[in-house]
Amino acid sequence: MSVLVYLEHADGAVDEPSLQAATLARSLAGDHAPQALVASDTVPLGLGGPLPVATVHVAAHEAFGSYAPRAVAEAIVELAERQEATAVVGPGTERGNEVLAHVAAILDLPLAANCIAASTTDDGAEVTRVRWGGSLLEHARIHAPRTLLTVQPHAIPADTDAPAPPAIESFTPSLSAAALARRVVERVGAATGGISLADAKVVVSGGRGAGSAEGFAPVEELAALLGAAVGCSRAVTMAGWRPHTDQVGQTGTKIAPDLYIACGISGATQHMAGCKGAKRILAINSDRDAPILASADYAVIGDMHEILPAISAAIRAAS
């Protein structure tokens, strides 16, 4: 089976969700290592070392210096046709899902999003994917001449044991006028103190229990001491206390930190779908029956406005 995987990159290296997508792509490809595509406005592109793919095809065009999902999709379709790819795999990030949705629209084929396993069949593929905010797994069969899917972030360990860096080849894709119509005119950074919520090793989040925007002061203080990112629940963004960029959840950012400290958060299904990749969860909540406690590795029952300052004080005393 010939498989093409779309890789996203930042700061000259392929990101973690793309490495996870490449890992599933390699298992789907069987005896043939998958091909890969990255889109960049510069060539050559440093990719950060060995990857589980045979060749990385760099689609080079000035349009890729900005956010251009339709243009990336057209480059993927062009390379997939050239490589006679029977499957196209991408990361299940917001951008990855959007790019693969454009690919599906161009080819008029179904797209299976947020997959955690896939295998080939005589007329397509069988996939297992996350549905309903992570509350169930769906086993489905895709009937299509070309399988299109994205991989649920942080659900598959990335395989970084490739013996050598892949070959790099570049090409200039043929892009339509429609693909070049969208352009970015302004970028607004996330209010996380320079730490990416999606990549942070430690995340400290506040929920409705914070009480107000000002109630996030102890959350921010602890995050600063731990070098952590600040997150929040959907209820907080709906109340206007924090921007949407801080939201952890199914409709926010999906995170996979080493430690997630959830303060005053009840643990609704959509929130837990966003933090299920966390290796350890510490829940601080005054309600001993809060749903989040069932998923927490550690729990402290009490008022976050008393507990967080005490933790911060202990950290200062130990440093």
Image: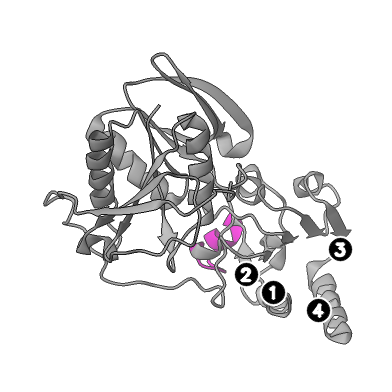
Kind of residue sitting beneath label 1? Ala
Residue 198, above or below 105: below
Tell me the mark number nearer the camera, choosing from 2 and 3: 2
Q: Looking at the rendered structure, which numbered label has been put on residue 312? A: 4
72 sits left or right of 199 in the view: left
Q: Where is residue 21 in the image (x, y as percent from the top left)?
A: 49, 43
Disc 2 + disc 3, Cβ < 8 Å: no
In reply to whether residue 242 is colored magenta, the answer given is yes
Image location of residue 223, percent across then percent down: 69, 74
| Cα distance in 3D space between marks 4 and 1 | 9 Å
Q: Report the predominant secondary structure element of the magenta stretch.
A: helix
**Residue 316 drawn in magenta:** no
Q: Residue 209 carries which label?
A: none
Which residue is at 48% across, 50% downward? Answer: 18
Residue bounds of the magenta highlight: 234-244
Left or right position of 109 against 150: left
Left or right, residue 23 beside residue 224: left
Q: Residue 229 carries which label?
A: 2
Disc 2 to disc 4, how far (Cα)? 15 Å
- For marks 2 and 4, the one nearer the N-term is 2
Foreground of the two, 251 or 298:
298
Q: Tell me which numbered mark, 1 or 2, is placed earlier along the sequence.
A: 1
The answer to whether one can see residue 255 in this image is yes
Question: Is the residue marked by circle 3 packed among few (<14), some (14-19), or many (20+) residues within 10 Å?
Answer: some
Residue behind mark 3: 302
Label 2's element?
A: strand
